[in-house]
Image (cartoon, rainbow, N blue to C red):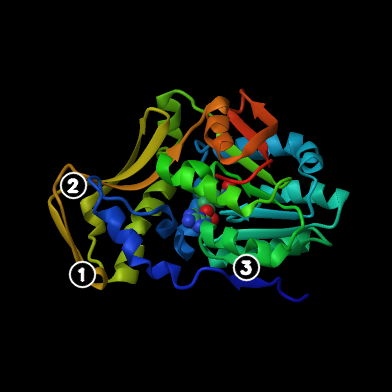
Amino acid sequence: MSASPLTQVDQDFWNDGALLEACLREPVPRIPPHFGYDALGSELFEAITALPTYTLTRAERGLLERCAADIAARMDTAHLVELGSGSARKTRLLLAECLRLRPTTYLPVDVSREMLEGSAADLVAALPGLSVHGLWGRYEAGLAALRDLVGGDPVVVAFLGSNIGNTTPAERAALIGAVAAALEPGDGFLVSVDLVKPAADMERCYNDPPGHDAFRRFRLNHLTHLNERFGADFRLDRFEPRAHAVGPVVEGHLHVAEDHRVTLPALDLRLDLPAGSTVNVGFSAKFRPDVVAAEVTPHGLVPEAEWVDPGLAYGIFLFRRVRQAR
Ligand SMILES: C[S@@+](CC[C@H](N)C(=O)[O-])C[C@H]1O[C@@H](n2cnc3c(N)ncnc32)[C@H](O)[C@@H]1O
């Protein structure tokens, strides 16, 4: 069997020091989320999804097991693009239903080449007849490359796994705007989100339960990645990973245990991190269904269908592009 095609859509994005420097210079220094997904980080994220307290993956899987046939029928497309596809294990449920209805091409977009290659091999083995074309790079680059690959055919762009919550509100508005700009009238946007729940439940979900260390290793790996890529000298033993809820957002932080001066020679940057300060390694925003619609509809996308399970505290929403993006 020949390997599925993979196109690099984003040149040298791992070395985008300008973005990293801007985020590290914010009042609370921040590492942009995609730096968490080098090969090891991608594996560690998979370990997180298996934690007994990490409810999202099982909630989305449960909802898809019930609703994938209906979603596939409503999507009505031969081209499914997924932003931040990761292992695509849950997406497989949806793709299987798409394939029952029509020949289907899946275009996953991800910064993790290892995940794109591994998931493509798994998918074509599991779903005979499925075409997979991986787009290696960041979301915006995948969206920009889309039309060259699908021409004028209708597409649905999916953002599953509540990935859309791994953004600041401004980043999210820009990203939804980029999705809308890539869509033609009639195209769809399928987005799934974890619903808002009590702060204690959200914090339990984003911290390691006793006897596990997947979150700890995933968060510290951001520093290892920067040490390797930018010649930084973060000392991992000076940081304590912990997540806490701030309103509807869970923030993952590395708490600085004692004063730490860090240099990133490749960026000619020095960071002074006093004891008690933190480095942010990720937002996970939670949503009410009306908030999802309020954030998406200003971009010329109208709600078409939704599959919301209050018991699972999870929702999947389909929007349709009706007019020019603003
Ligand atoms: C939280 S994981 C979710 C994976 C999968 N959607 C799931 O539900 O299991 C986020 C995924 O998005 C990818 N990712 C993160 N930031 C990205 C970016 N800016 N552009 C492209 N991919 C990104 C990561 O490599 C990772 O595979």
**Residue 72, above or below 313:** below
Instruction: Give, as a three-letter code, the residue at label 3.
Output: Glu
Q: In this figure, which residue is indicated by the disc labeled 3?
A: 117
Q: Which element is circle 3 on?
A: helix
Q: Which element is circle 2 on?
A: loop
Residue in view at x 20 percent, y 69 percent: 268
Q: In this figure, which residue is indicated by the disc labeled 1?
A: 268
**Residue 276, above or below 287:** below
Q: Residue 107: x and y, percent? A: 67, 60
Precedes in sequence: disc 2 or disc 3: 3
Of residue 275 and residue 94, the one placed in the foreground of this image is 94
Q: Quadrant of the C terminus?
A: top right
- Quadrant housing residue 233: bottom left
Left or right relative to 320: residue 35? left
Q: Residue 15: x and y, percent? A: 38, 70
Can residue 170 be seen in the rendering of this structure? Answer: yes
**Residue 127, above or below 15:** above
Residue in view at x 61 percent, y 28 percent: 312
Give the crowd class for mark 2: few <14, some 14-19, many >=20 residues within 10 Å. Answer: some
Label 1 residue near ligand 1, CB within 8 Å: no
> Mark 2 against mark 3, which lies toward the viewer?
3
Precedes in sequence: disc 2 or disc 1: 2
> Mark 3 against mark 1, which lies toward the viewer?
1
Q: Which element is circle 1 on?
A: loop
Instruction: Give, as a three-letter code, the residue at label 2.
Output: Ala
Q: In this figure, which residue is indicated by the disc labeled 2?
A: 257
Instruction: Give, as a three-letter code, the residue at label 1.
Output: Asp
Q: How many marks?
A: 3
Left or right relative to 207: residue 268? left
Label 2 residue near ligand 1, CB within 8 Å: no
